[in-house]
Image (cartoon, rainbow, N blue to C red):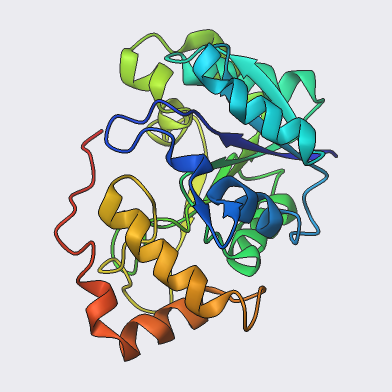
Amino acid sequence: MKTVAIVQARMTSARLPGKILMEVLGKPLLGYEIERLRKIPLLDEIVIATTRNASDDPVADFCEANGCGFYRGSEHDVLSRCYEAASEHGADAVVRFTADCPLIDPDISGWAIRRYLENKDDLDYCAVDVKETPRPFPRGIDTEAFSMRALSEAYAEAVTVPEREHVTLFIYTRPARYRAIWLPAERDMSGYRLTVDTPEDFMLIKEIIERLYPVNPDFGLKDVIGLLESSPDLIRINASVKQKPR
């Protein structure tokens, strides 16, 4: 049973181009995310799924320089890119991440992966809840674990543009066909935004890393929330940012 993390990554973000290689303390955001993913023992391999565009050559170069696997595929058919990357690397179970989440918590992501693997005979999809009620995690802690079988079926059958752009949409919107669960947080943390999509988002993540990483490189979500609760000025940095609609 090979469990492969697929991290969607591209440089042509609409609201903040090049964000995934923007640096904090001399390290790009993608470097922080890979570092944190490598702390999840249930992952057998990490693959950065980027595009064939010349604009993403720096992503491939970064992966080569840092010993991380990568795959280059379609920019807009993200489902095919994810499927081809997972297939090429022999995945049985797939864990999907996006490269704009440099503060992924290895313990929380590991929890979702473990829940899926322990119940894989009766479960097709397990995710950290960042958008459903009643107790969502902050955006930026997103983790989805699912079977290669479900991904293969989505790749073969999905036809709508949203289903090709959003890898798992085909799976979790078919409850009669696929068994899916979302893991809730201990309390509602949806008021915190820890993903990077705008300059304001980057400013907040930069502040968090600069304050926490030098003291404890293994800081987790609880440390981040503790910092934000003790420094309300930080929360205000990206409080006005709205998530792009799907």
The total number of labels drawn is 0
Q: Position of residue 52 (x, y in %)?
A: 58, 11
10 relative to 79, above or below: below
**Whether residue 99 is visible:** no
71 relative to 142, above or below: above
Q: Nearer the viewer, residue 166 or 192?
A: 192
106 relative to 1, above or below: below
235 on left or right of 35: left
Q: Nearer the viewer, residue 220 or 62?
A: 62
Question: Quadrant location of residue 63?
Answer: top right
Residue name at image x 77 percent, y 41 percent: 66
Residue name at image x 25 percent, y 69 percent: 191
**Whether residue 232 is visible:** yes
Q: Nearer the viewer, residue 242 or 128?
A: 242
61 on left or right of 162: right
Q: Position of residue 167 (x, y in %)?
A: 48, 27
Question: Quadrant location of residue 114?
Answer: bottom right
Q: Position of residue 148 (x, y in %)?
A: 68, 28
